[in-house]
Amino acid sequence: DGGITQSPKYLFRKEGQNVTLSCEQNLNHDAMYWYRQDPGQGLRLIYYSQIVNDFQKGDIAEGYSVSREKKESFPLTVTSAQKNPTAFYLCASSRTGGSSEAFFGQGTRLTVV
Amino acid sequence: AQSVAQPEDQVNVAEGNPLTVKCTYSVSGNPYLFWYVQYPNRGLQFLLKYITGDNLVKGSYGFEAEFNKSQTSFHLKKPSALVSDSALYFCAVRDSYGNKLVFGAGTILRVKS
C-alpha cells in the first residue's frame, strides 16, 4: 500500500522541549516537503528536499530543523526556538520536476501544553 | 518568487448550481498549477493540474479548471455542486526552474442543500 505516513497523529509538547515529527514515504519520490498549516494562512513551506543529504529552507524555517539521510524519510524537529509551534504539520512528497503533483500525509497536530 | 492568491475566504453555493473558486498566480517562466482539496483534520488530496496545452483541465470528482495566461488565473469550476463538495480548497504553483511548491491561503466551499 503506497503512500506517505506521518506519525504521531497528535503530539503534545511542553515549553522548552524539542520534538520530532516523522514522515516516511514508499512512493520512491526524490522530493519531500514540510508545511505548516494555521487557520486562515494556508500552507507555509518550512523545508524541502530534492535529493538525499540535501535540503533547502522554505519561507518559515526558523525554529525548525530537518534531515534527509534516507530517500524514504524526512523527519522534522520542532526546536525550543520555535516560539509558536502549535499548528497542523503536513508532509508531502513528489517526483522531481515542476509538473509533478505532491502527495500528502494525513498530518500531525502539535500542541504546546 | 512565485505566489498564489485566492481572493475569497469562503464561497457559498446551492446544491446543483455551478461553482467557481478563484485563483491567481505570479511566477517566473511557465507555471505549473495545481488544485487540492482538504477535509477536516486530513491531508490534502490532489484534484487536477495544468502543465501545458489545453486551457481547460479536467480532474477528479467532476472538477475542472480553466487556465488563463493573460489574466494569470487558474479558476476551479464544477457544473453542478454537491453537498459533499464542501471542503477547503487550495491552489498551488510551482515554477519551471525549481521544486518549491507554493500554496494559496485556501478557500472554504460551502454547498447547501
Image (cartoon, coloured by chain):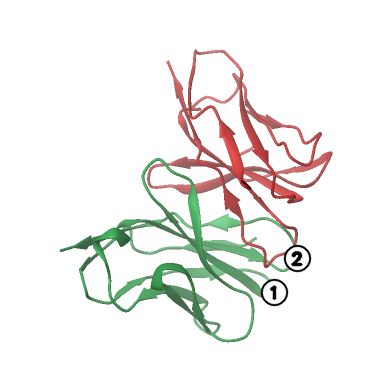
Chain colours: A red, B green
Mark 2 crowd level (few <14, some 14–19, many ≥20, 10 Å Cα) = few
Of the two numbered discs 1 and 2 on the same chain, state the one appearing first in sequence. 1
**Amino acid type at image mark 2:** Tyr
* Residue B30: quadrant of the picture: bottom right
Judge whether residue B45 can be spotted in this image.
yes
Name the residue rendered at 72%, 69% in the picture.
B96
How far across and how far down the image is residue A96, in percent? 75, 58
Q: Is residue A111 left or right of residue A8?
A: left
The CA span between labels 1 and 2 is 8 Å
> Regarding mark 2 in the picture, which secondary structure is present there?
loop
Q: Is residue B25 left or right of residue B64?
A: right
Name the residue rendered at 28%, 77% in the picture.
B18
Asked whether the beta carbons under mark 1 and mark 2 sit within 8 Å of each other, the answer is: yes
How far across and how far down the image is residue B44, in percent? 49, 51
The residue beneath circle 1 is B29
The residue beneath circle 2 is B97
* Residue B2: quadrant of the picture: bottom right
> Regarding mark 1 in the picture, which secondary structure is present there?
loop
B37 in relation to A41, above or below: below
Question: Which quarter of the image is occupied by the C terminus of chain B?
Answer: bottom left
